[in-house]
Image (tube, rainbow, N blue to C red):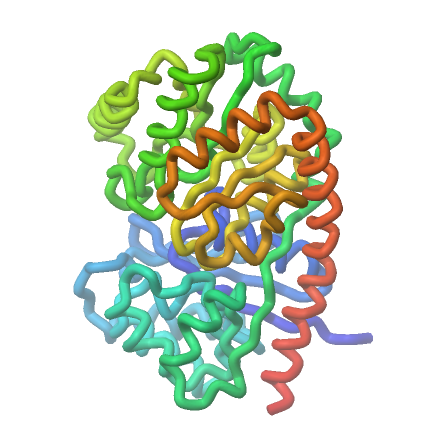
C-alpha cells in the first residue's frame, strides 16, 4: 500500500480566510486528498495547535510581519512542528513575500536540512520588493509561479532558472457552479434587493486587510468613477455590491466603514452601494457572484486574477484590466472584456454595453463557462504532485 506524503504548508494567514492564496492551498488539499497535510501560519496568540477538518494547524505569533522576535525561540517552535508532524516536503505559500526576510531565511534553512522546500510564489513582487529580492534567491528545491506574467517578474531574481515552473491557478467548480445562481435570489431577498435591479460586483477586497485603507492595486476608484459616469449617462437603477470590509481591524471597523462610505459618496453613488453584511466562509464565496450581473475587476498587475475565473465559473461576465495575469485569462470579446488600466471611461462603456446587448452578454457568459474547464482542480492537483515527486527525486 502506498504511503501518503506528509506535506507541511507554511502560509502567513490561515486557510479559513477567503483570499486567493488560501483558496489555492485548500484546492491542493482537496485535490490531493490521498496525502497528509499540516499548516504553519501566523496567529495573534502565542503558539497553538489545533485540528481543522482533519488538517493539523500550528500557529505562532512570532511569525507576525514587522515584529522583531527572538529567532532562537522561533526555531524552537519550528522544531516542535517538525518533530510532531515530520514532513516529507515543506510547501511555502508566499513564504518569499509575506514574511520578514530574516524569518523566511530561518524557516527555509531549518527545513532545508531535513526535506525538500518548495516556494509557491502567488505574488509577482509588485509590493514588498525588498522582501522578495532577499528571499526568492534562496536555495529552493522548486519555485512555482502562477502565470507567465509572474514568471517574467520573478525569474530575473534567480541565476538558475531551471527549477522555476508555471502552474496556473484552478477554480473549484463544485463550489463555484453557475447552477447555484438561483441561490442569489434568496441572498437578494435577505438584503432587500429587488431581483430586477442590476447588480455590479466588486468582489476584490475594497480595503486592505492589513491597514483598512483603500488600496491602489484593486482600483476601486476606477470602478467608482465609471459608475458615476454610467449613472449620469445611462440609468441610476443599479447597485454596487462589495465584499465585507472587515479584516484584522474589528475594533476600528466603524472608522474604516465611515471612511469607505465617504470615498464612495464623493462619486455620487453612495445610495447605490451595498456592502455584504458579514464575512463569508470560503465555502460561501459563491453567494457574492450568485447575486451579480457583471463583475468589475480593473485590478493592476494581479499575479493571476482568480476573481475572473470564479466569476466565469458562476456564469457572470467579467470586465478586467489588460494588466498582469488577468489578460492571460480573459480573451477580450470571447470570455470577458478587457479595458486599458485605469480607464474608467471605457469601463463605463463596457458596463453600458453589457446591460444593453443581450447577445454580447450571453456570448461572454458561455465563453467564460467554456474557459474555466481548462482550470480543473484535479488536473491542478496532479501538476502539484508532479512538483513534489520531482523534488523528492532530485
Question: At x 33% / y 61%, what residue is drawn?
Answer: 126
Residue situated furthest right in the rendering: 1
Instruction: Say above or below: 171 vs 117.
Output: above
User: Residue 275 in the image: x percent, y percent?
Assistant: 41, 22
Question: Residue 3, located in which quarter of the rendered image?
Answer: bottom right
Figure quadrant of the C terminus: bottom right
Question: Residue 220, located in which quarter of the rendered image?
Answer: top left
In the picture, measured across the screen, residue 216 lies left or right of residue 164, that is: left
Q: Is residue 109 visible?
A: no
Q: Is residue 296 visible?
A: yes
User: Residue 313 in the image: x percent, y percent?
Assistant: 67, 41
Instruction: Say above or below: 169 vs 154.
Output: above
Question: At x 74% / y 38%, what residue is drawn?
Answer: 366
Question: At x 50% / y 29%, what residue is drawn?
Answer: 201
How many numbered marks are there?
0
Question: At x 82% / y 75%, what residue is drawn?
Answer: 1
Q: Nearer the viewer, residue 109 or 31?
A: 31
User: Residue 203 in the image: x percent, y percent?
Assistant: 47, 35
User: Residue 33 in the image: x percent, y percent?
Assistant: 70, 59
Q: Nearer the viewer, residue 248 or 212?
A: 212
Amino acid at each position: 500500500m502506498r504511503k501518503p506524503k506528509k506535506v507541511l504548508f507554511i502560509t502567513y494567514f490561515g486557510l479559513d480566510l477567503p483570499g486567493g492564496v488560501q483558496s489555492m492551498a485548500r484546492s491542493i488539499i482537496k485535490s490531493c486528498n490521498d496525502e497528509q497535510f499540516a499548516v504553519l501560519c501566523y496567529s495573534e496568540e502565542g503558539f497553538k495547535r489545533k485540528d481543522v477538518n482533519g488538517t493539523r494547524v500550528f500557529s505562532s505569533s512570532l511569525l507576525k510581519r514587522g515584529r522583531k522576535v527572538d529567532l532562537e525561540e522561533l526555531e524552537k517552535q519550528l522544531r516542535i512542528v517538525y518533530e510532531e508532524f515530520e514532513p516529507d516536503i515543506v510547501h511555502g505559500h508566499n513564504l518569499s513575500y509575506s514574511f520578514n526576510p530574516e524569518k523566511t531565511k530561518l524557516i527555509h534553512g531549518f527545513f532545508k536540512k531535513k526535506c525538500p522546500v518548495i516556494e509557491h510564489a502567488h505574488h509577482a513582487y509588485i509590493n514588498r520588493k525588498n522582501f522578495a529580492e532577499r528571499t526568492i534567491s534562496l536555495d529552493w528545491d522548486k519555485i512555482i509561479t502562477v502565470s507567465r506574467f509572474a514568471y517574467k517578474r520573478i525569474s530575473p531574481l534567480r541565476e538558475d532558472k531551471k527549477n522555476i515552473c508555471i502552474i496556473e491557478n484552478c477554480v473549484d467548480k463544485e463550489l463555484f457552479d453557475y447552477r447555484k445562481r438561483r441561490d442569489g435570489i434568496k441572498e437578494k431577498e435577505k438584503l432587500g434587493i429587488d431581483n430586477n435591479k442590476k447588480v455590479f460586483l466588486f468582489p476584490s477586497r475594497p480595503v486592505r486587510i492589513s491597514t483598512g485603507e483603500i488600496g491602489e492595486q484593486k482600483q476601486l476608484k476606477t470602478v467608482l468613477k465609471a459608475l458615476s459616469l454610467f449613472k449620469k449617462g445611462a440609468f441610476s437603477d443599479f447597485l454596487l455590491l462589495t465584499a465585507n470590509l472587515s479584516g484584522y481591524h474589528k475594533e476600528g471597523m466603524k472608522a474604516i466603514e465611515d471612511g469607505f462610505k465617504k470615498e464612495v459618496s464623493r462619486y455620487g453613488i453612495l445610495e447605490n452601494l451595498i456592502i455584504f453584511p458579514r464575512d463569508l466562509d470560503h465555502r460561501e464565496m459563491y453567494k457574492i457572484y450568485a447575486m451579480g450581473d457583471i463583475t468589475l475587476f480593473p485590478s493592476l498587475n494581479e499575479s493571476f486574477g482568480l476573481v475572473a475565473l470564479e466569476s466565469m465559473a458562476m456564469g457572470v461576465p467579467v470586465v478586467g484590466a489588460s494588466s498582469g495575469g488577468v489578460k492571460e485569462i480573459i480573451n477580450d470579446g470571447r470570455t470577458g472584456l478587457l479595458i486599458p488600466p485605469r480607464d474608467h471611461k471605457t469601463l463605463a462603456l463596457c458596463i453600458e454595453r453589457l446591460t444593453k446587448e443581450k447577445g454580447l452578454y450571453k456570448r461572454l457568459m458561455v465563453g467564460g463557462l467554456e474557459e474555466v474547464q481548462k482550470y480543473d482542480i484535479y488536473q491542478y492537483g496532479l501538476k502539484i504532485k508532479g512538483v513534489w515527486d520531482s523534488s523528492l527525486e532530485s
